[in-house]
Image (tube, rainbow, N blue to C red):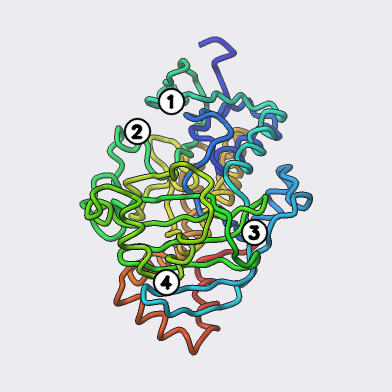
Amino acid sequence: MNKESTYDVAIIGGGLAGLALSILCARAGYHTILFEKEQYPFHKVCGEYISLESWNFLEELGVPLSDMQLPLINRVLISSPNGKYVESALPLGGFGISRFTLDHLMAGIARREGVTILENTKVNDVVYRHQASMVFSSNGSFEATVVAGSFGKRSNLDAKWKRTFTQVKPNPLNHLVGVKYHIQTFFPDDLIGLHNFENGYCGISKIEENKYCLCYLTTASNLRKSGNDIAEMERTILRKNPFLDKIFATARFLYQEPVTVSRISFNRKTQVENHLLMLGDAAGMITPLCGNGMSMALHSSKLAFEEMSQFLQGRINRYEMETQYTQQWEKQFNRRLQTGRVLQQFFGNGILSNYLIASLKPFPKLVSFLIRQTHGKPF
């Protein structure tokens, strides 16, 4: 390998976690390359609400959040399929920003810091040998001392390596479908709505430029029952919830077609695979109803950087780096994921979610308590 093809750090996937890690590594003086299969800017399925626990970290990376006049969100309204609802304050709160905007901003920062970003590049395999890894991509082969996997909910590498979560039979925590729109509508700037329907739930909250993110999760079986027609599924299933019926009837949809993703899984994942440190959704997904996936992705990049830097400086060996990262990841996120999996059993189940909302209505403080169980502190 020539010098131009050899790196200290290689990162597969240019979402929030991958970009944040690349910026941290480049600033610390590590020769860093990032592979992204799309080209910035682009849309992706995401609720686009970020807990305020990430605000300071993003600003430290160079994202000018304070100058962007972003909507600050401090209330949540949760409805059941029959239209019953409960409203609560959001502990700590959050803000709205599209991935189209945020990822593009962070990619620009990464380039300015010296990160080599290869867009429109698919990674086909990573092979560990001789204390380094070879990354085989559609844009050539590269060697790196440390490799991080930030390739989202499911990738070709997950299937190629037969990661455990890809072998699990269909259950309520996997084989799910995500759909996202940007819309214009009349909706409070400081509120996030979470609306249940049979076998799914839909979130709405404001992002930049007077737009709103409308994003929902449902089962593959719901889509099949609707003849694999998203519009038909929305008409016959989602709109039975009166809140969603009003949104779909009155909103101006800004895409010709929605952004979609399939085969989403919330089953447990490993944080290290083939000597790659997994970040963000590749390490483990919290259910979207918890509204904390973006913050977890960002925080995981910081945890990974701390261990990788210790290793690259020769202070710990590879085994210690991988073990300590796994331990730190579990310490920070395991409780949140477990809570999310429990809540997932109620949300999207017509009978259970109707019962849950009716039970929570007299106890709004209990809603705040449950939200706190899925969120962390500023990092």
Q: Residues within 10 Å of mark 1 (few under 14, many from 20)?
A: some
The residue indicated by pointer 4 is 242
SS for dot 2: helix
Image quadrant occupied by the C terminus: bottom right
Q: Earlier in the sequence, mark 2 or mark 4?
A: 2
The quadrant holding residue 55 is bottom right
Q: Is residue 24 visible?
A: no
Per the model, the C-alpha gap separating discs 2 and 3 is 32 Å
Per the model, the C-alpha gap separating discs 2 and 4 is 39 Å
Give the percent coordinates (x, y) of residue 181: 49, 50
Three-letter residue code for mark 2: Asn
Residue closer to the observer: 73 or 278:
73
The residue indicated by pointer 3 is 95
Per the model, the C-alpha gap separating discs 4 and 1 is 42 Å
Q: Residue at x 51, y 82 (%)?
A: 366
Give the percent coordinates (x, y) of residue 208: 66, 51
